[in-house]
Amino acid sequence: MQVKQYPFYIKSTVILFGIILVTYSLINLRDILVPVSFSVIIAILLNPLVTRFRKSGISHVLSIIISMLIALVVVCGILYFLSSQIVGFGDNLPLIKSKFSSLLHELQQWLQIKFGLTISKQVGFINEAMNSSKAILGQTVGTALGTLGVIFLLPVYVFLMLFYKTLILNFLYEVFSEENTKQVGDILSQTKTAIQSYMVGLLLEAVVVAVLNSIALLILGVDYAILLGVIGAILNMIPYLGGIIAIALPVLMATITKDGYSTQLGVIIAYAIIQFIDNNILVPRIVSSKVKINALFSILVVLLGGALWGVPGMFLSIPAVAILKIIFDRIDDLKPWGKLLGDEVPTRHKGQIWIRRKKNKSVAEEMVEQ
């Protein structure tokens, strides 16, 4: 039976309509899909721990509860540490506000002398910006309230996903034809390993970067060095864009709390060195080599994730594209897309020759395998 071939303009129209429909669904179902996506990642991370407890003879339900309690203790410990730092920041907030007001007044005087902008015009610009940002403020408050709801929903989602893991896997096997069972199994196994090793590596990288940031800021004498160092490490999880914001925060703090500009210059140099160490030493050796997306698509998917789901979308974008790359690499018709997303650059551009470099396993991958 001959397969009917449709003209290109019909195919492109159908594909474009499908992309628009998917985008519309992702935006409108954000409040549901964001906690579910995070729950999937957390469930995959906790699955090895649940399996280990089950091998020790503990029941399935109790293994899940113990694993979730261990994760909760770790998260609470981190939040307690950060909250103690934030309390100290709040005690000195009036002094910081006073210094910030003084710097703002100096900036207004400089703008008036340099560009002829009167104080009243500057205040008018600020008021216009504040009025236009009311909608953004309302959206931020709504996002914060939604985050509180997610915090209560996450444990429920994670527990149910771990409890019904076998049911979900059986569904994925049965929904495809029998001849594709091995291919589906390979995709699921590689996806699980890739996400586990990527997230474990990301956490290890964040710990090392937090220590380096904090040490650098302590040496430079920046106030709240540990708090800013930890926040910078968390922001560093957002590829490329997070590092820029991570540098801006301690520079702003140094500007408010210190005179002169030598400290700010020191922060920029120190963070540039840390970023170099992170990109050239930590990431290749610690973070999973199976989730290597080239820089171009990393930036694009982070921006698209932020446009669709805000900050959570930025964090989820790279794991989502990593899963797509694994699927593309296993399906013949989609392999060119998998190569396009990857960071392996061919040495030749003619024919079908694609030379791959053999990569050593990262620290995260070795930990997951053990």
Image: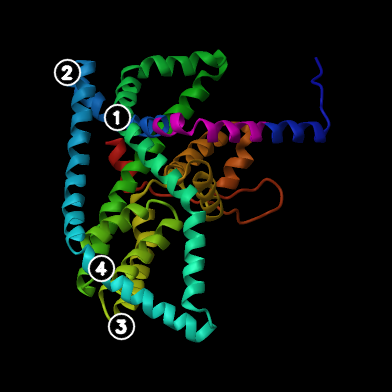
Q: Secondary structure at mark 3?
A: loop
What is the secondary structure assignment of the residue under circle 1? Answer: helix
Q: Is residue 269 placed above or below 307 in the rendered structure?
A: below
Sequence-wise, which precedes: disc 2 or disc 3?
2
Task: State which tag comes first along the sequence, 3 or 1.
Answer: 1
Magenta portion: prevailing SS class: helix
Asked if residue 111 is positioned above or below residue 50 in the image, the reply reads below
For the point 58% across and 45% down, the residue is 339
Crowdedness near tag 3: few (<14), some (14–19) or many (≥20) residues, C-alpha within 10 Å:
few
Q: Amino acid at mark 2?
A: Ile
Q: Which of the two discs, 4 and 1, sits closer to the camera?
A: 4
Report the front residue among 370 and 201: 201
Amino acid at circle 4? Ile
Which numbered disc covers residue 152? 1
Q: Is residue 3 above or below residue 251?
A: above
Disc 2 on helix, strand or loop? loop
In the image, which is nearer the foreground, mark 3 or mark 4?
4
Check residue 96 in the rendering and tell me which mark sits there, or answer none: 4
Residue bearing the label numbered 3: 260
Disc 2 and disc 3: Cα gap in Å?
A: 61 Å
**Amino acid under disc 3:** Gly
Question: Are the residues flagged by discs 2 and 3 in contact, CB closer than 8 Å?
Answer: no
Looking at the image, which residue sits at the far bottom? 113
- Write down the region rendered in magenta: 18-35
The alpha-carbon separation of the residues under discs 3 and 4 comes to 16 Å
Q: Position of residue 128 (x, y in %)?
A: 52, 61
Residue 362 in the image, given as x and y percentages of width and height:
35, 48
Viewer-side label of 2, 3:
3
As rendered, which of 207 and 124 lies closer to the eye?
Answer: 124
Viewer-side residue, 298 vs 315: 315
Question: How far is mark 2 from mark 4, CA to CA?
Answer: 53 Å
Q: CA distance from mark 3 to mark 1?
A: 46 Å
